[in-house]
Image (cartoon, rainbow, N blue to C red):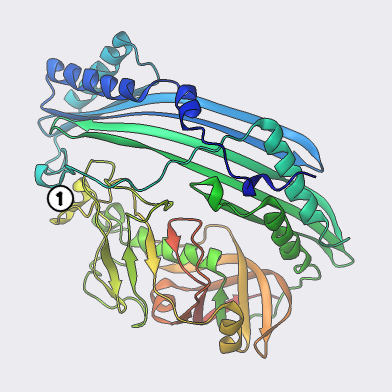
Amino acid sequence: MPAPTALVRPRDATATHAARFPVATAELARVAAVVLDATRTGGATSAEVDVSQGIGQSVTVRKGEVETIAYNRDKGLSVTVYVGRRRGHASSADFSDASIGDTVAKALAIARFTAEDPCAGLADPDRIARSWPDLDLYHPWDLSVEEAIALGREAEAAALAVDRRLVNSDGASVSRGESEFFHANSLGFGGGYRSSRHHIDVAVIGEDAGGMQRDFWYTAARSPRDLASGVEVGRIAGERTTRRLGARPLETLDCPVLFEAPEAADLIGAFVHAVSGGSLYRKSSFLVDSLGKEVFAPHVSMREEPHLARGRGSAPFDAEGVATAPRDVVERGVVRGYFLGSYSARKLGMATTGNAGGSHNLVVSHGDDDLPALMRRMGRGFLVTEQLGQGVNAVTGDYSRGAAGFWVEGGEIAYPVEEVTIAGNLREMFRDIDAIGRDVDRRGSRHTGSILVGRMTVGGR
């Protein structure tokens, strides 16, 4: 068996991958300029355009056999025009001049039949980025199909070798992807960059007298050098599945709930949604008018860090060309910032926070305890390692989701748990956070350790 592919120093394939993109970088800028010229000629008072392209490869192996091989190689443009305060939008995958003309004409036609909106328009000129840092987001992975297949087989084999009760597989996937975009508007902004995203994931199935269980693990990074090896990913997936064998439900009770770091990120995601512009100006959030108010326990802070090198959520400017900057979002439990683009900011009578297109890397404060130490601190309660369903009411904050994990007794795992529901209200859950672990999961854009909530209802038999 060859050495794990993820650990082999990747070949420098920047030039090769540049040639494999559908068009050259200069063509993206040229198309953007043609689009903006067409909007001016057509009578738009202002406009913005995104031109993008991407390439990728994904291989899935199941039980040692190749199940799927997929490629993508695409490009597209989208244009938004404003005729006064009327807005129109259209898109196309064709970069020809004739298609550009048709696309712009459709956007203008939509704008002329749209009601005026006093909040519509481009970002304020003084917020537009004029320079920006290189965030080291582009690392092509020169991985052939044959190498990806070998890596997938290696990862799956490592998972199945963990325990003889691992009898089946949902497969191992190995994917590499690269993208590039150029954004321009009639305020004079023009800029873009390339980025990459690669991952390896494995899911296996175990069976014993108590039934079947499934679990998975994955690694994801901008650079292949930052990926865990396929063997490590497979081993963790196998161990996670094995430890779930023999799971059983609980009796309904109230107890502390400890969210493992990957699941804790969902709690942070619920907060981000609740303090994002669309939810706030529509008043469809339980955190309306929460700015300056204590929402979390006083030991909880969060900071948005859009300029982290190689970060999943890193961006030098947002989807409107507004410069991003690090900032405190929660300070000692108090909400210090929302997530706003220009439109939602105007609806709220505020200024954009550089979050058109979404939040960036959100880094959550943490203590010194790792996951075992948090279990000891909890003493007796439920450790959540998987959540099911979408039972979050954004308006009221009510939280109710299916869950699986482990019952903890005396600070140690006692047995695996399945078929239960965890329920509470996010207002109370956020205030009732007892501790956040140092086992920070950085694979996504919300960097948090495991979160211990002091009390929730666990619904079982």
Closer to us: 76 or 194: 194
Left or right for 34, reference 253: left
Q: Position of residue 298 (x, y in %)?
A: 33, 83
Q: Position of residue 117 (x, y in %)?
A: 15, 39
The part of the image, by quadrant, that contains residue 45 is: top left
Task: Point out the image quarter for the N terminus.
Answer: top right
Left or right for 332, reference 151: left
Above or below for 455 versus 244: below
At mark 1, the secondary structure is helix
Q: Position of residue 276 (x, y in %)?
A: 30, 57
Q: Amino acid at mark 1?
A: Arg
The part of the image, by quadrant, that contains residue 193 is: top left
Residue located 49% across and 28% down the image: 17
Q: Position of residue 222 (x, y in %)?
A: 48, 47
Above or below for 330 versus 119: below
For disc 1, the marked residue is 346
Task: Point out the image quarter for the C terminus.
Answer: bottom right
Residue located 83% across and 51% down the image: 168
Residue located 62% across and 76% down the image: 383
Left or right for 442, reference 142: left
Q: Residue furthest top?
A: 98
User: Alpha-carbon neighbours of circle 1 within 10 Å: few (<14), some, or many (≥20)?
Assistant: some
Above or below for 369 versus 56: below
- Can residue 253 be seen? no
Above or below for 82 versus 128: above
Closer to us: 100 or 404: 100
